[in-house]
Image (tube, rainbow, N blue to C red):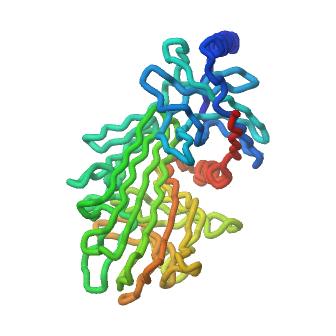
Amino acid sequence: MTYQIVSRPRTAISAIYLLILAMLSACDQKIVLAEILVSERQGLDRALEYVKVRLPVAKQLDGSEQLFLVEKNSRNLIPAQIRDYDEDQGVLYARVIFPVAIDAGQHKAFEAYIAPKKEVNAPFPLDKAYYLEYQEEEGIVQNSFYSVRLSNSEEGPGGQIEELILKKNQGQVLKRGHLSMHFAPNFSRPDMQDYSSIESLGPFSENHIEKGEYYVSTKREGNIRNFQEIRVAGTYEFYKGLPYFIFSSTISIEKDVELGLLRNDEMTMDSLFTHLMYKQNAEARIRHVDLYSDELDALEKNPIADNAPWLSFYHKEKEYAFGCIRLQYDNANERGTLSTVDRPYTKISAGSDGGRYWNRILIQKKNKKALKGDVYREKNAYLVFTARTSDPEKEISYFEERLRYPLLIEVNRSE
């Protein structure tokens, strides 16, 4: 799967670039906010990635202004999305995101500018086939590869994923009929039959949404109803032109609490897939398992490791796939030791009505006490892709390499 950033012809870009320089100089403005150096050092071509940086600005931009990047060699202009602002030691910063394409081993330098929009009509540079939309009332986020529906509650929007539609695979719908498809993190007390999750946040939870041309994120954080001892934070990140979304979560134990179960990275789905594939560790070969055979039972005796790099369900005949690339897994607590766990592993389960799901078990023993200061952190990329019969793991391996080894970014502030 390839992506292409579409830029203007160099002559047109250069003319606009010179116009901007003249305009800013005439206004006696500080021309360059910062220089941003982007380096690819893993020998991997990057058809589309996003750079996130924090840039000093004199003030918050109004609707008539645009922050953009000029690539120093090509003079291509890239409008940036400003996510938000923060202040540090009296300096105002804008948190910025913008797309790049870069070849293996290449270095690129960008200069960041602010100019009136009416003077610079530089369009957002991705191909028109790519788009990103967030419909807040419906709780729907969609791009050219997928559409997700997030649960809403009286506490606010931005809950967990209830449904995922695969746009490149005949609109295949992934869901779990009686509960949210993404049900993580979740936990229960020894005497409880049901589980609580981030959807069970109390009335004073914090809800934050960012939305723009390239990037949408939803964050929820707070203490759980009936679990005031536990504070949970979860953030979804969605990108224009990329076939994955990222979910980061933190479980913080604020008071000692007895648990009957603690899980994360749980995806529950109806009978929609035929096979599982996974990589046990960085060096291991990729294994394939029939989800409706005795091979699934064998995984209970020889389970997938809790820190397995990635796993995916796929449909062998229809070739659609949905997988998880695990980018961060950290159970270090505030005391500098390992948080309470009980034989952690990755579980693949058979649910009711033929459903199948995966999760990461952290605690599975009744009456296991999680201690104040225990913290459980995860960051996972969830990828929709095509699992070709000839090479089903090709696409997930491609994205795992690039997500595992991000671009190196350096920001040099102008004085």
- Count the labels in the image: 0
Q: Quadrant of the N terminus?
A: top right
Q: Residue reaching furthest front?
A: 90
* Residue depicted at x 61% and y 49%: 399
Residue at x-position 20% and y-position 54%: 154
Going 74% across and 36% down the picture, which residue do you hit?
103
Left or right, residue 50 beside residue 176? right
Q: Give left or right: position of 92 versus 262.
A: right
| Between 119 and 201, the one nearer to me in the picture | 119
**Residue 366: image x %, image y %?**
36, 88
Can the viewer see residue 181?
A: yes
Q: Quadrant of the C terminus?
A: top right
Taking 157 as reference, is 35 left or right?
Answer: right
| Image height of 45 relative to 326, above or below | above
The quadrant in which residue 302 appears is: bottom right
Residue reaching furthest bottom?
367
Q: Quadrant of residue 12?
A: top right
Front in this rendered view, residue 294 or 48 = 48
Residue ID at (50%, 47%): 244
- Which x, y percent locates residue 397? 63, 53
Give coordinates of residue 275: x percent, y percent: 48, 61
In the rendered image, the vertical position of residue 70 relative to residue 327, given as above or below: above
Is residue 12 something one can see in this rendering?
no
Q: Position of residue 157 (x, y in %)?
A: 29, 49
Residue nearer the viewer, 397 or 246: 246
